[in-house]
Image: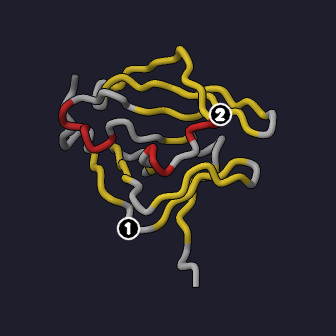
Amino acid sequence: MKIPGPDHPITVTLNPKRVRARIDGHVIADTTEAMSLQEASYPAMNYFPRKDVEMGFFAKTALHTACPFKGEASYYTITIDGNVMENVVWSYEDPYPHMQAIKELIAFYPDKVEVYEVEDEA
């Protein structure tokens, strides 16, 4: 386990905007409680509370990866309209103590699932 620091900073903050995830026109996540994780120089990632995600489209897979800063990630496959997308979702179900802000939240690979902030809907 490594602790984030000046050489590899990680911040987790509440995204003040409404955030959605969409696949082939289907909104599968919609929240006003997304946590934005900024890690080093990587693009920020939005993590969704499970209560705001259509988990019925997901199936947990056997894939697990380890991040020295966050812990072990579990992966999920999404099946929607007969389209199977393997391991496009991940979650840190038991992250390291300093990363509890993302515990059991859901993140999507942005090259597979469209994640976007919703502009004011008037």
Query: Which residue is rendered at x = 38% and y = 61% of the image?
Result: 15
Q: Position of residue 36 (x, y in %)?
A: 38, 53
Mark nearer the N terminus (2 vs 1) = 1
Front residue of 69/6: it is 69
Query: Which residue is rendered at x = 54% and y = 57% of the image?
Result: 30
Q: Amino acid at mark 1?
A: Pro
Q: In the image, which disc is placed on residue 101?
A: none
Q: Position of residue 51 (x, y in %)?
A: 45, 47
Left or right placement of residue 3 versus residue 80 in this view: left
Query: Which residue is rendered at x = 39% and y = 58% of the image?
Result: 33
Kindly state the secondary structure of the residue where label 2 is placed. strand
Q: In the image, which disc is placed on residue 78?
A: 2
For the residue carrying disc 2, how many other residues have a C-alpha within 10 Å: few (<14), some (14-19), or many (20+)?
A: many
Q: Amino acid at mark 2?
A: Ile
Q: Residue lying furthest bottom in this view? A: 122
Query: Which residue is rendered at x = 56% and y = 57% of the image?
Result: 20
Foreground tag (2 vs 1) = 2
Left or right placement of residue 9 versus residue 57 in this view: left
Above or below residue 1? Residue 39 is below
> Pointer 1: what residue?
16
Q: CA distance from mark 2 to mark 1?
A: 27 Å
Front residue of 13/28: it is 28
Front residue of 30/10: it is 30
Q: Residue lying furthest top in this view? A: 62
Q: Position of residue 13 (x, y in %)?
A: 30, 56
Kindly state the secondary structure of the residue where label 1 is placed. loop
Quarter of the image that includes the C terminus:
bottom right
Q: So how many labels did they put on this image?
A: 2
